[in-house]
Structure formats: C-alpha cells, structure tokens
Image: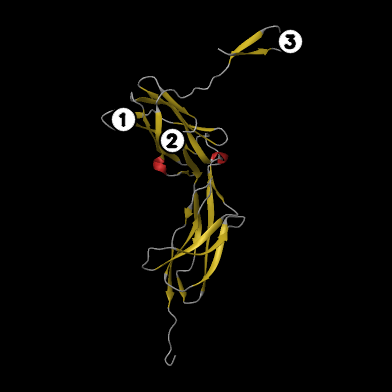
Amino acid sequence: MALCGVAAVGAVALVLVPATVPETSRGDTALVSVVVNGGRTVELGPTETRTFPVEVTATDRSGIRAVDPIGLWGPNYATLKVGPMTCVPLDATGTVSRCTGEATAAATSRVLFDDQAGTWFVDLRIRAGDGDRYVSKSAGGFSLKRTAQFDEVSGPARASSGEAVQVQARLRRAMWDEHDWVPQPGTPVYLQFRPAGSDTWTTLAAAGTDGEGRVSMQMPARLSGAYQWFAPGDKWTGAAVSAELPVEVDAVPVHPGQ
C-alpha cells in the first residue's frame, strides 16, 4: 500500500495516510448503453420535483450481477443519488442485462442551484457474476435544465387585412436559488404564425427580449390564424412556447366598380 507522510508543525509525530487508488475496469464486462429520462432533457421549475428513470444496459459472459454504486454529477460539484437498480436479462443466455432505477431532482431541496444546470453525467460500477467489473465516471450524459415560460402574452383577437397588429410577451426562467421565476433578458425569441386550418407554424421574425424579459413586435395582418412566441433555449435553460393567440382577419371589402 502506498503511503504519504504528513508532518505536524511543531511536533515530532508523523501521520501516515493511505494513498487513494482509483478503481478501474477489469475483465470482459462492457457497457452497452446508458439512457437517462428516455433520452429527453430533464427540466425543472422553481419549486418542482421530478423523478426520472435511469437505464443501464451491460454485458458479460457470466451475466450482470448489479449496477452499484451509481450516481449523477453535474457542474460545480452537483450530485444526485440514483435509487437501487433492478437488473433483468434480455435473452436466454443471460449475458446481456438491462438495469433500471430512478433519480429525483428537487428544486427546493437545497441540493440544486442555478449554476448547476447544464450537462450531467452518470458515475457507475457494473458488477458481473464472475467478479469482473466496468467502472466509469462519465458512462453517459444528459441535460438538466431550468424551465422557461412565457407569460403576459397578448395580441388583438380581430384585425383588418393589412392592419399592423402588435404581439407581445414576457420570457421568464426558473431560479432554483430563490425558488421563483425571474425575467430572462437578452434572449433570442421568434414570432411564429399558423394559418387557420393548418398544422404548420412558420417563423415570421426574430427579436431579443429587453432587460425585463419582454418582447413586442408589429406585423401586418394578412390571414386568420394564430400567433405564438418560441424561445429555443440554450445549454442551461429549456425551450419555451407561449400560449397561442388566435386572430381573425377581416377581408378588405370590395366596392362596386373596383
């Protein structure tokens, strides 16, 4: 065992501390895949608690005995626990197994903070029936983001053809530190339109939110349909779509002789 010496100032005694040796993989145990939350981003509101699945598929000639320990880690020393994993063989040979468990993220737990949103990883050890193992600090990645939302969405319900209509909204995102919603300034957003009877949204224009997270835009009314705002989000904040704003556009009357 490797030892390192630490001498106390003003004392003769020498304290011997065992050196830590990182655990490594051994044998033919292999990781097939890691899937967190079904491959979807985990988004968390300011007071929300989310429980989501963690799935590990692995293989070994002797079979998979367990995935233990396992945990999740993210930016700025963030960690989350994963509950006990249950492993089930996927074929008659028993060489490939899928192990599933759950993790819980709570914005009010004082475990998560704003600067810990972003890319997270799975830290695990897979144990085989013959004593082999697979060890990884970053076996798989996923995104844990702060939820975003639009509010104060408004626009006219009726307009004349060609009339300039004003559509506005405010963009906010979850603040895990204070468990509240805060404005999201300087963020690109897009105004979209869907004609009546259509399922397709078309982007009309792009804009940026002001210092209070608000955005406003004027567009000429052409067709009846609906407007909505869309914010694509980023590495730390989820995407947001506003409530739809239906608008009925009156056709310009045609006078006799025209």
From the image, tell me which residue sits under label 1.
Answer: 88
Mark before the other along the chain sequence, 1 or 2: 1
Tell me the amino acid under the disc marked 3. Gly
What is the count of numbered marks? 3
Residue 29 coordinates in the image, percent (x, y) = 40, 26
Q: Please report the residue visible at 50 percent of the width from the left and 62 percent of the height from the top.
A: 191
* Near-viewer residue (84 or 89): 89
Q: Is residue 248 left or right of residue 213?
A: left
Instruction: Find numbered disc 1 in the image and state the secondary structure of the residue it sits on.
Output: strand
Toward the bottom, the furthest residue is 257
Residue 153 against residue 69 in the figure, above or below: below
Closer to the observer: label 1 or label 2? 1
Q: Please report the residue visible at 50 percent of the width from the left and 30 percent of the height from the top.
A: 137
* Near-viewer residue (141 or 118): 141
The residues bearing labels 3 and 2 have C-alpha atoms spaced at a distance of 48 Å
Tell me the amino acid under the disc marked 1. Val
Mark before the other along the chain sequence, 3 or 1: 3
Is the C-beta separation of discs 1 and 2 under 8 Å? no
Identify the image quadrant of the N terminus: top right
Closer to the observer: label 3 or label 1? 1
Q: Is residue 111 left or right of residue 88?
A: right
* Near-viewer residue (222 or 244): 222
The quadrant holding residue 178 is top right
Instruction: Find numbered disc 3 in the image and state the secondary structure of the residue it sits on.
Output: loop
Tell me the amino acid under the disc marked 2. Thr
Residue 164 coordinates in the image, percent (x, y) = 52, 73
From the image, tell me which residue sits under label 3.
Answer: 10
